[in-house]
Amino acid sequence: MNADPVTIGSVFDLTFAGIGHAREAFQPQLAPHETGTITSVSNGIATVSGLPGAGYDELLEFPGGVYGIAFNVDEDEIGVVLLGDYSDLHAGDRVQRTGRVMDVAVGDGLLGRVIDPLGRPLDGKGPVTSDKRLPIDRPAAAIMDRSAVNVPLQTGLKVVDALIPIGRGQRELILGDRQTGKTTIAIDTILNQRGKNVLCVYCAIGQRASAIAKAVANLARRGAMEYTVVVVAEGNDASGLEYITPYAATSIAEHFMEAGRDVLIVYDDLTQHARAYRELSLLLRRPPGREAFPGDIFYIHSRLLERSTHLHKDLGGGSLTALPIIETEAQDISAYIPTNLISITDGQIYVSPSLFELGVLPAVDVGKSVSRVGGKAQRAAYRAVAGDLKLAYAQFLELETFSRFGARLDEGTKKIIEHGRRIRECLKQPESSPVAVPAQITVLLALSAELFDNVPLEKMSEAEHAVQEAAAGMPAEVSGRFESAAKLSDEDRRAVIEIARKALAPFQPKPDASPRSKPPAPPEAKPDADAGAKSRPPPKSQGGTTAKSAPPQPKPEEHAAAETKSAPPQAEKS
């Protein structure tokens, strides 16, 4: 245990020598930090002074971990939008620059999670795992980096897939009054993407917490959260969070698109986003315009939706399909925000409150709905029947309105109305019940072949369900051609119609009883007396003339008298 004192001393010498060299080599680094001061705090807005180097959209850090975005950059002060609880902020508090813009975590670790626009988890499953972050406001893809929309996005809704088709990379607006089923259409579309290699992002802006919890529970119960990211800004959150939510959700979706994957994003809804932006702009003293919205309200929505596209195959060929939702008031689709988004998007699905009240669900008004680019991506099997179906349905709607006036209708008009009623019944669909492509095409072909016209209206739901079950047993080679771009051959059409006809056979009305079962007609009485002949009129034939039975013979004296009266006198003859 006796240590050599010379050895211990040398160790200490070497150690101190190394410390001395490190001290001499150290060069202090002075990093300047700009620090400002809060001059005033209002409803989600703070005014900051003393940050001359801050730029537009730069992220600023406040005490308590609250962040804000520089919105108004003036000469003497900065108007900041606060992204969180600002109840503990007061005038005189310190504000520090971060030198970066607002960004959000992206990656596969977000799938199945519920987060806020700042990337903080809201589902109680622990922190979000991510190794990459992207700015929330990014420029849209250049024109030469885009490709045409040529692949359909199946929603599972017959009325949409057949009459208002949507393509991958398209922007299709969903608009209508409140509580008419707009969110249900979007949620059903997300549910239908299971097994189709499409990732989904559901962006809830300013919605009630109970409504968001219901939607998330529905997605989780049906296994859709495995491929879905939910980004939430509740109705009681700060207006700044509601404003940045769609941009953060789009950056998350763009990460998957740039990796060559197909993505669907739902904005529910942009009306709340526009109102949040209007509130922030008015508090920042920006000049108001129509309906008190600022003048750049069109720009903030167009730059958001322009990020949805179909990339060129050289860039991976990914796509981002957008389904923005807008709430109208009293069916006024000519209001400011609805007309803005109608002009920005590639088509709209109008949900009618009158159809909703009649029980026609989904309450899609086919006459006011349109898809401007989805028809190019629609499968050929749909195109073979969709044109005639839409024309027949439009004729029915016009004639049904006309028939309510009590006018007399000919047989052709009655047939069109009855056929249209069957079309409307077949386009009805329960919530959260997407229909597969073979079942849809089988039902549509049966409609175009008028196989449902003899089915009673009260049995239409059962009949359609029977046709869908029969389509599930269709040969694989026939159903496989439905998914391809090949046209539907006459042989395939006949095979599908025959399957539908067999399925509908039990629902056809039974034919009337045969003539043999009718009771025999009573035998005619024989004319055996003159009185009977006089009292009974001669039978009439179908043409209205007397029958060919022998007329009654007059008596001999009557015959002679008749000859005497009819014969002219001899003198007159000569």
Image (tube, grey):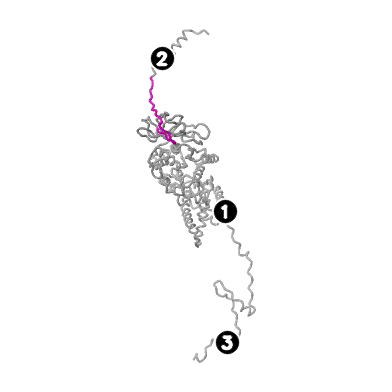
Q: Residue furthest left?
A: 75
Q: Disc 3 to disc 2, how far (Cα)?
A: 166 Å
Which one is closest to the eye, mark 3 or mark 2?
2
Residue 315 as seen in the image, left or right of residue 456: left
Task: Residue type at mark 2: give it.
Answer: Gly
Q: Quadrant of residue 563?
A: bottom right
Please state which of the two labelled residues, at mark 1 or mark 2, is closer to the viewer: 2
Residue 141 is drawn in which quadrant? top left
Q: Is residue 125 left or right of residue 25?
A: right
Numbered badge on residue 459: 1
Where is residue 432 shown, x and y percent of the image? 53, 44
Question: Residue 498: where, in percent of width, then height?
Answer: 54, 53
Give the spatial CA distance, label 1 vs label 3: 74 Å
Alpha carbon distance from label 1 to label 2: 95 Å
Looking at the picture, how far across and down is residue 495, in whole percent? 52, 52
> Which residue is denoted by mark 3 in the rendering?
561
Q: Earlier in the sequence, mark 1 or mark 2?
A: 2
Q: Nearer the viewer, residue 514 or 421?
A: 421
Which residue is pictured at 50% across the width and 38% down the height? 228
Q: Secondary structure at mark 2?
A: helix
Residue stretch rendered in magenta on the structure: 27-47
Residue at mark 2: 20
Magenta stretch encompasses residue 33:
yes
State the residue in front, 317 or 372. Answer: 372
Label 1 CA crowd tier, 10 Å (few <14, some 14–19, many 20+):
few
Q: First in sequence, mark 3 or 2: give its number.
A: 2
Please say whether residue 256 is visible from this viewpoint.
no
Amino acid type indicated by mark 1: Lys
In this view, 114 is above or below 180: above
Q: How many marks?
A: 3
Using the image, determine if residue 250 lies above or below residue 96.
below
